[in-house]
Image (tube, grey):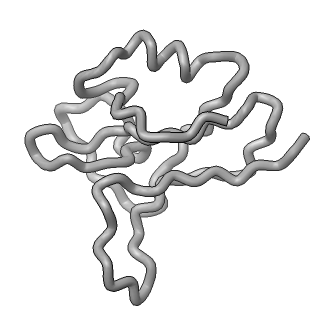
Amino acid sequence: MIMGGLNNDPFDGEGLKPQLHSLLSDPRLQDPEPLASTETVSDPNHAGPAEQDTVDWGRNIGSLRVDYVLPSASLRVAASAVERQQAAGQAVEMPAHKPVWVDIFWK
């Protein structure tokens, strides 16, 4: 499993797109393409799906998918999401990078 903030969106923004696409399509891994659990706002200047964006860097850069959880291809993914909702009663504001989670089963 590979997890982390790669600061590279597969469609938008700066970054090494061929290298990221190579990682996302590596046969040893799988990309569950987690979606946001809440309504998203599409940016007409971006090509990527807004539901997968994990960070919002404001109006100059916008929202991008830059955080990843890529399980091994040998694992079965049960569910995945980008968590954008603040927990009820949470006093601290959510950080710019939103949590990404993946539920897996051992095969």
Q: Residue furthest top?
A: 18
For image coordinates 82% across by 31% down, the residue present is 74
From the top left corner, tell me how far across and down residue 23 is, in percent. 55, 19
Q: Residue furthest bottom?
A: 89
From the top left corner, tell me how far across and down residue 76 is, in percent. 80, 41
Q: Is residue 79 left or right of residue 58?
A: right
Q: Is residue 10 above or below residue 76?
A: above
For image coordinates 61% across by 38% down, the residue present is 32
- In this rendering, the count of numbered labels is 0
Q: Residue furthest left?
A: 60
Q: Is residue 76 above or below residue 58?
A: above
Q: Is residue 8 above or below residue 104?
A: above
Q: Residue furthest right?
A: 107
Q: Is residue 32 left or right of residue 52?
A: right
| Quarter of the figure with the C terminus | top right
The quadrant in which residue 24 appears is: top right
From the top left corner, tell me how far across and down residue 19 is, in percent. 44, 13
The quadrant in which residue 44 appears is: top left
The quadrant in which residue 87 appears is: bottom left
| Quarter of the figure with the N terminus | top right
User: Looking at this view, is 83 or 41 the one in front?
Assistant: 83
From the top left corner, tell me how far across and down residue 7 is, in percent. 34, 34
For image coordinates 70% across by 17% down, the residue present is 27
Q: Is residue 25 above or below residue 43?
A: above
